[in-house]
Amino acid sequence: MKTIHNPEFNPTGIEGGVDTNTLPWIRLLPAPGVSIKPLRASSESGMFSAILQIKAGTTLHGLVHLGAMDMIILSGSMNYSDGPLASTLNPGTWGYMPANARIRSLTATTDTEFFGNFHGPVAFLDADGRQVRSVLTALDLQAAARERGIALIPNTLAQCMAPRPNGYCGPAEPLAMAGTASKILVDDSAGRRANTVREVNPHFIDTRALPWIENPAVPDMGLKILRVSEETGITSLIVRHNGVAGPHYHLGAADFLILNGRIGYRAGPPEGYGPGVWFYEPAGARHEATQRVGVDDLIYTANVYGPLQFDSGRGTPILAVQSWMQYKEMADSVGARLVRNTFEGDASLLAWAPLGSAGAPL
């Protein structure tokens, strides 16, 4: 098979990744008390990825997610006051908000940091909850990164192969979880949280209370399956990767945030990359092998946006294709209750009143 979509190139080892601990916090002006580390922003789809920090005591009122969002709490604690998201989120909690979800109130009880993928803009409403005063988009992230000399992660395979611009050279502001035993974020194998309730609510899940799903055919690999979309094919996971993943293509994009251990990645350094490093694999990316470095459990979050195609080497026949269907079968086999993809009959969505009715925004 001639692979013209992924020709030979000289990788840098981290052309699709960034150590978030080296980036600065940028204040988000429409939301006092909130800062952001921009990671990726797409002009094509409007999707952007970032780590956010909310200072203790900050309350945000009137947010509307014009696109869906997934998130995982890295440190601190925050709560949603009402509606279908009403809950307290602690480290290791993962959640998903469907497009057009309206957030009436969000409060950080302590300094809180979380990673989020935003599949569209976020609107900030006025005090009356009816007028939009500001909108955060992928273009805003691009502008903020450009002003501070931050090189965002490439969106396509072709961009990954191009010379990368100089990265951020200013003062580093590490994540709060930097240097800590971050495995505890998502792993309860030592029984530290025995008998805990695994589900915060239908839209958030305590990943520490989920069991690892083992597959005898793939030794030294464990999965916690969080969400599967039968509409888009997107699957969200926590991965414990202690073996070697053989040669494969990413037929769809994927992103990864290292939480524990170190990963050996393309032509990267011998010591690999550790907690706080975030990777984005564009559609068409290929790995001949990916494995942990060292003896600590390699654990990372993963959002998989399309199938993985496995073979035994470049140009060899396809051995297997892993898609949302296989992940769904695995989740069903252990009776896993996945995070919901939509708000069922929720009145807190964007439409304040029936479209076209008196006084309703159009």
Image: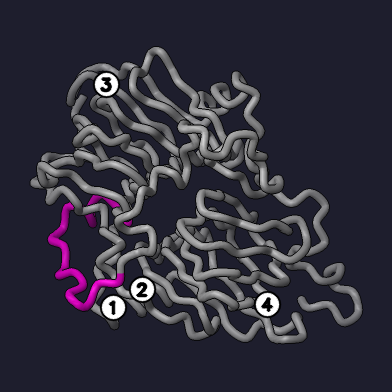
**Residue identified by numbered label 3:** 311
Task: Kindly identify the residue that appears in the image at 29 percent across and 63 percent down.
Answer: 21
State which mark lies toward you, 4 or 3.
4
Tell me, for residue 142, which label it has, or none: 2
x and y percentages locating residue 278 in the rendered image: 32, 53
Which one is earlier in the sequence, the residue at label 2 or at label 3? Answer: 2
Residue 127, placed above or below residue 153: below
Q: CA distance from mark 2 to mark 4?
A: 25 Å
The outermost residue toward the right is: 358
The answer to whether residue 139 shows anywhere in this view is no
Q: CA distance from mark 4 to mark 1?
A: 29 Å
Q: CA distance from mark 4 to mark 3?
A: 50 Å
Quarter of the image for the C terminus: give it: bottom right
Taking the image as shown, residue 100 lies to the left or right of residue 243, namely right
Secondary structure, magenta segment, majority class: loop
Q: Amino acid at mark 4?
A: His
x and y percentages locating residue 324 in the rendered image: 51, 31
**Residue identified by numbered label 1:** 146
Tell me where residue 355 sits by quadrant: bottom right
Q: Which residues are magenta?
A: 155-173
Task: Kindly identify the residue that appears in the image at 28 percent across and 58 percent down.
Answer: 154
Which one is earlier in the sequence, the residue at label 4 or at label 1? Answer: 4
Q: Nearer the viewer, residue 14 or 229?
A: 14
Q: Are dots 3 and 1 in contact, CB under 8 Å?
A: no
Q: Are dots 2 and 4 in contact, CB under 8 Å?
A: no
Q: Amino acid at mark 1?
A: Arg
**Residue identified by numbered label 4:** 61
Disc 3 crowd, CA 10 A, few/some/many (<14, 14-19, 20+): some
Q: Secondary structure at mark 1?
A: helix
Q: Are dots 1 and 2 in contact, CB under 8 Å?
A: yes
